[in-house]
Image: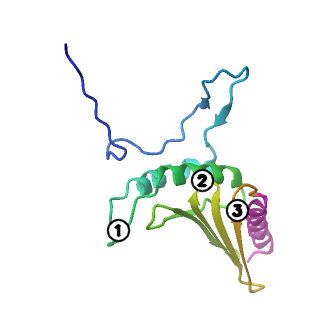
Amino acid sequence: MNVAVVKSSVYQDEIANYQAGDGNVSSLSFRATPVRIQNPNSLWIQGLEDRFNELTSLPLGWDGYNGQPVTFNCAQFAANLIERLCIDSVPAPQLVPGADGTLQLEWHMNGFDIEIDVLAPYLVIATRCNHESGIDEEIEIQSDFSELADWIEVLGQARIDLQQTGN
């Protein structure tokens, strides 16, 4: 009897760790109606796909200490969050790895600093600094991301206002 042993590794240089894909994911259950989850496909995600792969493939100790690569769960949740926040008037966020495997999304523009720390799926801490008013805000989010979406919308509106005034 021949037995084939197949080994796999989560992080392989030649295999992408994150890929949005073109299709949908369907549940295989006994439900009468399949549950479908859309794969992220916004322009933001398309532009960030290589960065996601890079961050989930970081070597242990990437920061000179004990830095961990961004976890797949954090990257996948961040991609879904980015998909929901995407608006045409705002460029994609910068992706910054946390040494503990978390991921931070950042925008620094139009007099605002917005930083979103994805600590785990459905565990997000977001901060916004309005340099014009001097107001700093922090919110912890676990399920309702509407306030965060409002922040990004204001960021986009500030960009449009700046473009219209020529500044």
Q: Mark 3: which amino acid?
A: Ile
Mark 3 or mark 2, which is nearer the start of the sequence? Answer: 2
Which secondary structure, mark 3? strand
Where is residue 157 shown, x and y percent of the image? 79, 66
Distance between the alpha carbons at the discs numbered 3 and 1: 28 Å
Q: Residue furthest left?
A: 1
In the rendered view, tell whether residue 13 sits above or below residue 107.
above
Q: Is residue 46 left or right of residue 51?
A: right
Among all residues in the image, which is located at the extreme bottom?
Answer: 134
User: Residue under circle 1?
Assistant: 66
Which of the marked residues, 3 or 1, is nearer the chain's N terminus? 1
- Residue 131 at x, y = what percent? 71, 83
Query: Which residue is depicted at the point 69% across and 61% down?
Result: 90
Q: Quadrant of the C terminus?
A: bottom right
Q: Which residue is denoted by mark 2 in the rendering?
A: 121
Q: In the rendered structure, are the residues bearing label 2 and label 3 in contact, judged by CB atoms less than 8 Å apart?
A: no
Q: Which secondary structure, mark 1?
A: loop
Q: Is 161 displayed left or right of 72 in the figure?
A: right
Mark carried by residue 141: 3
Q: Nearer the viewer, residue 51 or 162?
A: 51
Q: CA distance from mark 2 to mark 3?
A: 10 Å
Residue 56 horizontal/vertical position (percent):
43, 53
Confirm whether the magenta stretch covers residue 155: yes
Name the chief secondary structure element in magenta: helix
Q: Residues within 10 Å of mark 3 (few under 14, many from 20)?
A: some
Magenta stretch in the rendered image: 146-167
Quadrant housing residue 109: bottom right
Residue under the image location 61 percent in, 31 percent down? 24
Question: Residue 25 appears at what percent x and percent y?
Answer: 60, 31
Mark found first going from the N terminus, 2 or 1: 1
